[in-house]
Image (spheres, rainbow, N blue to C red):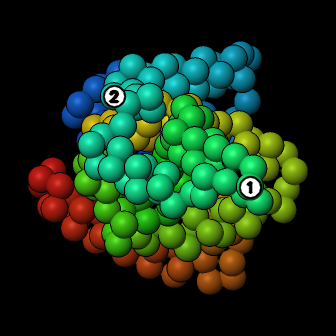
């Protein structure tokens, strides 16, 4: 595949989803950072200071992720959470073998007892593939605006990409670097109008690796054409639903 064809495919993968348009409509600068970073990550062409530019763009995406997210306050519980906490607290025995053990306090009332579950919840939500391809269905979140971020036709490429990446050490290290925003989002929360956009380049990187598998197949022209047509139709459906067209 020529460099020009590769660039066209990269641009198709980046712009054939509702997510990037939502980002650009709300913050053009964030959209520009995300697109530029995504292109540089999958581009094989090397130039001076490329790694420094990638690192700078990556850190910028983390900064804006933090700036545009409504930070979770793990120290404050809602009335419903307090009610559930008190119910669970009463289930713990006051004594074990005649010895006073404050198990209820340790597991329910201590500050750490609800900070760690909160962080874990944020992490698991962003590891849920349904959030990115099916708008969170069937586990939609009440406090977060759900929307389909990528066409569901990208799922086979995403899975293929993961298999390729985990079979190559250098790519696996790159994925580890790109997935580091998961730590930040787990700590600050998921209440962001644009979603976990700092993970967007990671998804493009994975999907591109999957697409490279298609390029090596014997009947690749038919398969690639079918994939592009299907993805285009799904994207149009998403754009209509999202109010883009």
How far across and how far down the image is residue 192, in percent?
Answer: 33, 36
Instruction: Please state if 39 lies on the left or on the right of 216 as rendered.
Output: left
Q: Residue at 84% across / 45% down in the picture?
A: 170
Q: Quadrant of the N terminus?
A: bottom right
User: How many other residues sit within 10 Å of disc 1, few (<14), some (14-19) or many (≥20)?
Assistant: few
The residue furthest front is: 98
Picture quarter with the C terminus: bottom left
Q: Earlier in the sequence, mark 2 or mark 1?
A: 2
* Residue 182 in view, yes or no: no
Which residue in the protein does label 2 denote? 70
Q: Secondary structure at mark 2?
A: loop
Q: Which residue: 57% across, 48% down?
A: 104
Q: Is residue 147 left or right of residue 12?
A: left
Tell me if 90 is positioned left or right of 94 in this view: left
Number of marks in picture: 2
Left/right of residue 121 with respect to residue 159 in the rendered view? left
Tell us which disc is closer to us: 2 or 1. Answer: 1
Occupied quadrant, residue 197: top left
Where is residue 136 shown, x and y percent of the image?
36, 62
Q: Which residue is labeled 1 in the image?
A: 98
| Residue 244 in the image, given as x and y percentages of width and height | 15, 50
Q: Position of residue 82 (x, y in %)?
A: 35, 44
Q: Secondary structure at mark 1?
A: loop
Q: Would residue 180 be seen by someone viewing this image from the given angle?
A: yes
Q: Are marks 2 and 1 in contact (CB under 8 Å)?
A: no
């Amino acid at each position: 595949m020529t460099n020009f064809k590769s660039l066209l495919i990269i641009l198709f993968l980046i712009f054939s989803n509702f997510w990037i348009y939502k980002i650009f409509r709300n913050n053009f600068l964030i959209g520009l950072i995300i697109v530029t970073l995504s292109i540089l990550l999958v581009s094989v062409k090397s130039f001076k200071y490329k790694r420094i530019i990638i690192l700078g763009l990556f850190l910028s995406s983390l900064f804006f992720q933090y700036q545009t997210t409504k930070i979770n306050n793990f120290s404050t519980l809602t009335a419903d959470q307090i009610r559930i906490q008190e119910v669970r607290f009463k289930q713990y025995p006051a004594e074990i073998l005649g010895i006073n053990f404050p198990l209820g306090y340790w597991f329910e009332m201590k500050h750490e007892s609800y900070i760690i579950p909160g962080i874990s919840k944020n992490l698991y939500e962003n590891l849920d593939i349904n959030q990115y391809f099916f708008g969170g269905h069937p586990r939609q979140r009440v406090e977060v605006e759900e929307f389909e971020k990528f066409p569901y036709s990208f799922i086979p490429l995403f899975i293929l990409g993961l298999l390729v990446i985990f079979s190559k050490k250098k790519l696996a290290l790159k994925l580890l670097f790109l997935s580091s925003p998961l730590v930040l989002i787990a700590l600050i929360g998921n209440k962001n109008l644009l979603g976990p956009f700092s993970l967007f380049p990671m998804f493009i990187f994975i999907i591109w690796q999957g697409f490279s598998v298609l390029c090596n197949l014997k009947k690749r022209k038919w398969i690639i054409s079918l994939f592009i047509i299907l993805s285009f139709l799904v994207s149009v459906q998403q754009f209509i639903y999202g109010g883009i067209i």
